[in-house]
Image (spheres, helix red, strand yellow):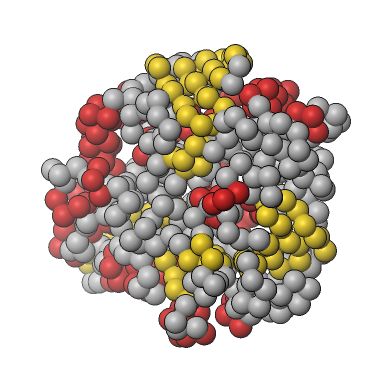
């Protein structure tokens, strides 16, 4: 995790938190691929389930917009693309990066790059993009200017001076999508502009657009065009699981029940799937409320649960039960704290659960867990309506807590109301997730930083359980201020111990990244044996995939 000057940067990613249960919405309509043909009929064409209409597409390719078309990021590039699985970064519009100290980041901008309209790309475009975000805060979706004090340009070098010692900030800067000054300087309202005819540096340009489907064409002047074997990408507005299976898709991201008898069976020779862990699905206790603020009580909850059974039911055996270290495994296997037994796995034990509950003031009488007044313990668990894997998991949780004598009510609000409950602390226990950003610092910081505890209710996406501990804050501050790998490992060991011992979140199972691929037309897809990226079809990850694929015929 130590930063250095080199052509291939090795560091962790700071990215938006992954909603591991929120899969692409699907529709019963059939995908219309007749205009361009599917990947199986037109050589060099990739049929991708990478975007969904609602039910049709709007022509929005503004890379800063929350409502942009997903394939916008197949056209625009950041300074570096980070593999969210392990934090390793590949330079794109930056040829290399240096971090001479923890408050300075230096990017050497790649030479010889052109915008898709033929204009030269340069360091001034990088400065313009960051200045544009400073002037229009709505564009700064990654919060880059929370870290930047100033920036300067000298030749092909862009230097960022940070507000504090802030080693992880570079991971934010890496991922900002760069736009052309000669186009955007005349845009009156860049936050609402739909950018219908995008000019970008990336491997693809917009080809055709209709409300039901759009296509991208290979950018012939792309700076690494020799690595791009896909000539055209077809993105239909309708991408139901039935569409994906029956229409010969090359690439999609979606959960399918019994994927072997659906997706794989449709083309046994070519279709495959890969579901690496993308986050830790957990029970988040409201630490501002009794009895959830009592560690003994949280230990009782933890010991009462059979994680293997929960994982198997929730995700149909495709992912594993999660350990209680806060690490995604096997992604960060080599960062495990060796002093924590069994990789942090918690084995169900009714006797240990009842002993812990007794310390918290609850005993079992007549099959019921009761307080000192003889009143049965009743609690509620909140999960989002329609998030089927969360619901399957929480149903097992209810069964297992009921088995020790707790009465459990389930709340299933719609997704928007669920998010409000997270923000406002309107819950006892709530199903949620953490981790998967590609940055160990960010994963732990989002879960444990008491500053986020104070900010919840104002739009923050972290520390929903409202954990706060001064010693843990000090550890996070040390983590933020060092680039020394040995020191980082010592800190991560201690942070794992915090999550394991203090149970700010009760880890249940890993949320899968539901990637489907076919090697009928293209080979070189990411796999467990070659995990250079995940199979996510949005964000900058596809840039890694699209520069790896090879034609199969």
Q: Is residue 369 above or below residue 4?
A: below
Q: Is residue 99 left or right of residue 177?
A: left
Q: Position of residue 108 (x, y in %)?
A: 53, 25
**Which quadrant: the N terminus?**
top left
Question: Which residue appears at 46% of the width and 40% of the height?
Answer: 90
Quadrant in the rendering for residue 500 = top left
Q: Nearer the viewer, residue 30 or 266?
A: 266
Q: Position of residue 470 (x, y in %)?
A: 33, 25
Q: Is residue 388 left or right of residue 277?
A: right
Question: Which residue appears at 43% of the width and 23% of the height?
Answer: 98
Q: Is residue 62 left or right of residue 287?
A: right
Q: Position of residue 234 (x, y in %)?
A: 69, 65
Q: Nearer the viewer, residue 511 or 235?
A: 235
Q: Is residue 373 above or below residue 110?
A: below
Q: Nearer the viewer, residue 468 or 371?
A: 468
Question: Which residue appears at 75% of the width and 53% of the height?
Answer: 206
**Residue 186 at least partly seen:** yes
**Which quadrant: the C terminus?**
bottom right
Q: Is residue 392 left or right of residue 65?
A: left
**Residue 463 at least partly seen:** no
Q: Is residue 185 above or below residue 539?
A: above
How many marks overall?
A: 0
Q: Is residue 140 above or below residue 102?
A: below
Q: Position of residue 13 (x, y in %)?
A: 45, 39
Question: Which residue appears at 47% of the width and 29% of the height?
Answer: 96
């Amino acid at each position: 995790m130590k930063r250095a000057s080199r052509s291939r940067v090795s560091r962790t990613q700071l990215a938006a938190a992954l909603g591991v249960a929120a899969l692409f919405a699907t529709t019963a309509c059939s995908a219309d691929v007749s205009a361009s043909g599917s990947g199986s009929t037109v050589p060099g064409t990739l049929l991708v389930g990478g975007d969904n209409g609602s039910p049709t597409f709007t022509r929005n390719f503004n890379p800063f917009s929350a409502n942009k078309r997903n394939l916008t990021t197949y056209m625009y590039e950041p300074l570096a693309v980070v593999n969210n699985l392990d934090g390793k970064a590949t330079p794109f519009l930056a040829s290399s990066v240096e971090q001479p100290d923890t408050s300075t980041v230096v990017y050497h901008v790649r030479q010889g790059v052109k915008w898709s309209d033929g204009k030269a790309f340069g360091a001034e475009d990088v400065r313009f993009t960051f200045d544009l975000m400073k002037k229009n805060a709505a564009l700064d979706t990654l919060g880059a200017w929370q870290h930047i004090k100033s920036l300067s340009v000298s030749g092909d070098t862009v230097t960022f001076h940070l507000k504090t010692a802030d080693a992880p900030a570079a991971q934010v800067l890496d991922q900002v999508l760069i736009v052309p000054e000669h186009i955007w300087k005349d845009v009156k309202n860049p936050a609402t502009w739909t950018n219908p005819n995008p000019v970008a540096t990336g491997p693809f340009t917009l080809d055709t657009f209709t409300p039901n489907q759009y296509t991208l064409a290979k950018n012939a002047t792309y700076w690494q065009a020799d690595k791009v074997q896909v000539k055209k990408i077809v993105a239909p507005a309708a991408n139901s699981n039935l569409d994906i299976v029956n229409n010969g898709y090359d690439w999609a991201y979606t959960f399918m029940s019994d994927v072997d008898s659906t997706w794989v069976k449709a083309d046994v020779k070519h279709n495959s799937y890969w579901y690496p862990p993308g986050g830790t699905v957990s029970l988040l206790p409201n630490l501002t409320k009794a009895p959830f603020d009592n560690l003994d009580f949280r230990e009782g909850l933890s010991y009462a649960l059979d994680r293997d059974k929960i994982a198997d039911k929730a995700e149909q055996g495709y992912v594993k039960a999660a350990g209680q270290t806060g690490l995604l495994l096997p992604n960060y296997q080599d960062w495990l704290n060796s002093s924590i037994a069994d990789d942090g796995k918690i084995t169900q034990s009714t006797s240990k659960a009842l002993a812990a509950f007794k310390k918290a003031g609850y005993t079992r009488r007549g099959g019921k867990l009761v307080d000192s007044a003889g009143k049965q313990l009743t609690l509620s668990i909140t999960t989002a309506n329609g998030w089927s894997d969360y619901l399957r998991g929480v149903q097992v949780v209810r069964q297992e807590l009921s088995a020790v004598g707790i009465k459990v009510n389930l709340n299933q609000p719609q997704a928007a109301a669920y998010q409000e409950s997270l923000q406002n602390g309107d819950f006892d226990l709530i199903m949620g997730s953490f981790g998967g950003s590609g940055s160990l610092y960010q994963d732990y910081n989002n879960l444990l930083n008491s500053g986020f505890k104070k900010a919840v209710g104002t739009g923050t996406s972290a520390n929903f359980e409202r954990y706060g501990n001064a010693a843990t804050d000090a550890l996070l501050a040390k983590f933020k201020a060092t680039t020394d790998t040995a020191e980082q490992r010592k800190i991560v060991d201690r942070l794992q111990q915090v999550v394991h011992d203090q149970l700010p979140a009760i880890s249940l199972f890993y949320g899968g990244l539901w990637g489907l691929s076919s090697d009928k037309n293209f080979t070189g897809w990411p796999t467990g044996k070659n995990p250079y990226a995940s199979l996510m079809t949005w964000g900058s990850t596809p840039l890694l995939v699209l520069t790896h694929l090879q034609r199969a015929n």
